[in-house]
Amino acid sequence: VVSERPSDFSRRCWVAVSTPRVINVDQNAAYPGAIQDLKQAEVLLENGLCRPVKYLTNIVEQDHRFIKRSVKPGLGFHFYPTAWRTLQAYEIMHLIRKGQVRGLDQGDRLAQKPFIEGCLASLHQPESSF
């Protein structure tokens, strides 16, 4: 059974990150169709490649290991919006630390400050809350 296409998630991922030339995905059958839809909607480059990688989950787990370690001490979230905003902030800070934000150098704290303030100010409550 093929799960629903993850295009909504993909659109949110490309907001702060530059458009990639190659997208590594696991071998889920939904990804090629979702990437094709994003190309037709001109969210992704038309000449971008979709490359299925057998062990992608290992790569993703390595990338999110830091975030999982940061979240464990703060698992006392009482409300969904609080948890959502906190996790978004962890993701933003991790992207900056890894140098994945275009126009920001890893060590340039003065340039990072306005970017972080703008991102945190723009975090809003998700569409559906409990």
Image: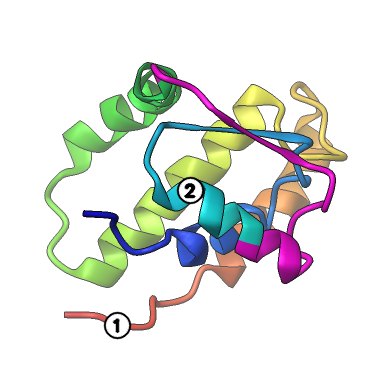
For residue 61, side relative to residue 25 (left or right): left
- Say which of 114 and 66 sits in front: 66
| Mark 1 nearby-residue class (10 Å; few <14, some 14–19, many ≥20) | few
Where does residue 86 sit, x and y in percent of width and height?
37, 53
Above or below 130: residue 110: above
Local secondary structure at mark 2: helix
- Say which of 93 and 12 sits in front: 12
The residue wearing badge 2 is 31
Answer yes or no: do the residues labelled 2 and 1 have beta carbons within 8 Å?
Answer: no
Above or below 78: residue 65: above
- The alpha-carbon separation of the residues under discs 2 and 1 comes to 25 Å
The residue wearing badge 1 is 128
Q: Say if residue 3 shows up in the picture.
A: yes
Residue drawn at point x = 62 percent, y = 26 percent = 97
Query: What amino acid does circle 1 point to?
Result: Ser
Which residues lie in the magenta part?
37-55
